[in-house]
Amino acid sequence: MSLKKLIKSSSLRHILLTSGLIWLLLAGVLWLSQTTVIEYLTSSMEQELEEQANELREFAQSGAMQQELIGEREIPLLEMDSPENEPLDTFLSHYRDLIAREKQTYSSNPWLTSVLEARLFLLGYTENLPAKTFPLNHLTELLIEEIPEHLHGQLEPIVESNMEQFNAHYQWQFDSLTLKKYLLAEGWMEQDYRCFFLQNKNNSLSNMTGDIPESFTGGYEFWWGQIRNEFGQTEPAACLLHQLPLDDQNSLIIGQRVDYLVELIDKLSLMRYWGTAAGLILAILISVIISRRQVNKLSRIHKTCALVEQGQLSQRITVPSPSDDYDKVAISINQMLDRLEKLVTGIKYVSDNIAHDLLSPLTRIRSKLDMLAMDAPQSAEKINHIINEADNLLLVFNTLLRITQLESGSQRQEFRPFNFIDACADMVEFYQPAYESKEIQLEVLYQKDHFNCIGDFNLWSQAISNLLDNALKYTPEGGQVVLRVFSQQGQLVFQLQDSGPGITLTDHEKVQQRFYRLEKNRSSQGNGLGLALVKAIVDLHQARLELSEPPGLTITIKIPL
Amino acid sequence: MRILIIEDDASVAEYIKKGLNEAGHVVEHFADGKSGLLSASTDSFDLLIVDRMLPHVSGTKLVTTLRATGDQTPVLFLSALGEVDQRVEGFSVGGDDYLVKPFAFSELLARVEALYRRSVLKKSVDDTLVVEDLVLDPRARKVTRNGQLIRLQPREFRLLEYLMRHAGQIVTRTMLLEQVWDFQFTPQTNVIDVHISRLRNKVDKGFQHSLIHTERGMGYVIKKAH
């Protein structure tokens, strides 16, 4: 199945369609899977950032951030020796006494005093709230150590509610000032696995350099810029940023390094391009393979039909295992060919039998007439006229048979290569004296001495002979006849032009039929089959026969080379 | 001549037999291939006339077998099938001539006598041909009559040569078409008459006796005038 034939065939549409669909499918799958992967990774990062942000906010608004910033100032532990399983009231009274004593001792130390007061607050013995900057959390931790374990359960709720009161009173904010201290304290500036930008009018804090996005669609944005790393140097980075509004109209932008993700996306994009290209090739291959079977089937059908058209009537399309519509068509065609072969063979059989069965009686008639002429010489002349009629009848008969046989096409198997000019030259030479005796000028123009063509030499000789005969018959004395042979557009052209009466356009079709004779010519010699035989020979060779309009007649035969 | 006819059609056989007898030949007849082959191989004949379609053994098979035994008797095929390839087949199995039915008896007779003469006389192709004062030298390709050189075109020369090789015998138009022009079909045969008349113009005109004669209804012959 040559490439050229493939391109010309209508199966190309089939292949293009199939490969287009397959390719779209592959490309779609590829694109979808990549998008899904990237989406998944991005959304899990977004979730993490969200959690981080919420954690920070809660941390700040619970006061824990501020407390942490306050740091640990030295708070001495109140040591008490409590007996085991001391009841609560007893313990508390001892505890309070101790606190009172300590207060007296350290009355000049405001810090220590405040610590003792805070203890009382936590236990609910005073309404005085400790200062905002007091490390109450830390104190709570100390209390856990100072209070015996078996009393923890009872005191915990009290301490907690007082803590809450403390926090509620001060309304801890998620603000930029606190955050700035916090971030600095936590060393965020030295961290290169995350990026942040704390917006605070002229007092921003950030480890990012480059353009910071103004707007965030959906709260998240990808950012490419520079980050300061732990060594103080800047390095290029890619981050996924999330913006949180702070309670004081400022905002904090936090982000995660996504360099690896960007790399992944780039690689995936590259893969996508190559994958698409490969997919296209793959798609074409697959569809060619799929279509190949169909195309092969079609070409088998076409080849067989071409062979049959050339006369090999016994050719059939091979159908190894009937499965699809093409096979059904092939089987139908085979059945048609069976019928065709039968018909043509039938015709051959009939005409061969006619040749034997009908010719025999005719032959007998003729031979009996011949014998009669021998026996009765006085009537010989009259009998010879009858014999002439019988001979004419036989000639018509034979010519008819020949025409039918030629139309069946089986003669094509006898085609051989030969020089067309040889056939012309033989006939011209034969007819020359006859033309001369009628004083008709016969001019012969061959473009070349050699015109190779493939066909039946004898049939063409007969055709040329018939045409020359007609021209001789219908051209008046002193007329001109020109015979030309030349090539034109890949065809061999034979042209015979005479100066006779010609044939009008309306008669062109009819004269090529059997037995048709133009009214004006009915009297002249001939049986009306000459041109019909020429037509049959022309058709057999798949050539064309053209007639011209009067004046004169030019017969043109175009033979494909 | 002793002639053997192998033909299954009784009336055709009758027709041929009668005509040949009247022409002075002795004729034997068999109606099927087997007995015909037997007779041909055991008896000697000067000529065989064999029909292609025969019962038992076909005409072509018969001739093939005969030739295989070394028998060189001239064979004339008769057949209802006249296609070129069938004629070629007839010659390729060893036939010497091929005549399509129906035929005029005169045609058959002319060919039979031509065949016989060819086989009997066995003249060399190069020998000079002479009819009265007309001399044709095939090797020099020269024709003279009464010492005068006659200029002929190639085809005219061939035509004259053929007539002279069969001098005294009737040569039919069909024979001329086949042998001189090598046509495998028959165009309008009266075109040949024109060729003959042109030849006559060159060979007979101006000389005392005409040598080329027309036998009406049969053909042409070149012979001494009586």
Image (cartoon, coloured by chain):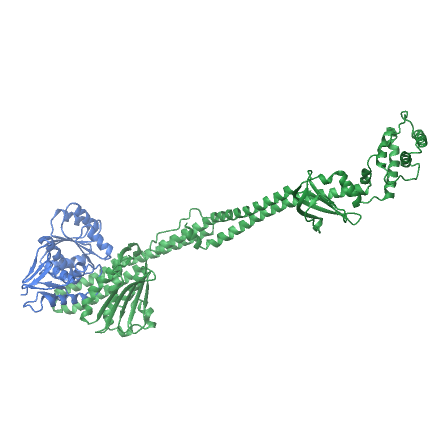
- Of residue A397 and residue A485, the one placed in the foreground of this image is A485
Residue A317 pos. (x, y %): 39, 50
In this orientation, does residue A357 appear?
A: no
- Of residue A43 and residue A473, the one placed in the foreground of this image is A43
State how many labels appear.
0
- Of residue B102 and residue A463, the one placed in the foreground of this image is A463
Figure check: A282 above or below B166? above
- Of residue A65 and residue A524, the one placed in the foreground of this image is A65
Quadrant in which residue B115 is drawn: bottom left
The C terminus of chain B is located in which quarter?
A: bottom left
Compared across the picture, whether A111 is left or right of A339 comes to right
Figure check: A36 above or below A494? above
Residue A118 pos. (x, y %): 89, 36
Residue A472 pos. (x, y %): 23, 69
The chain letter corresponding to blue is B
Quadrant in which residue A378 is drawn: bottom left
Compared across the picture, whether A549 is left or right of A375 comes to right
The N terminus of chain B is located in which quarter?
A: bottom left
Residue B20 pos. (x, y %): 12, 58
Compared across the picture, whether A20 is left or right of B119 comes to right
Quadrant in which residue A105 is drawn: top right
In this orientation, does residue B176 appear?
A: yes
Task: Give the colour in which the image draws chain A.
Answer: green
Residue beneath the point at 83% across and 43% down: A172
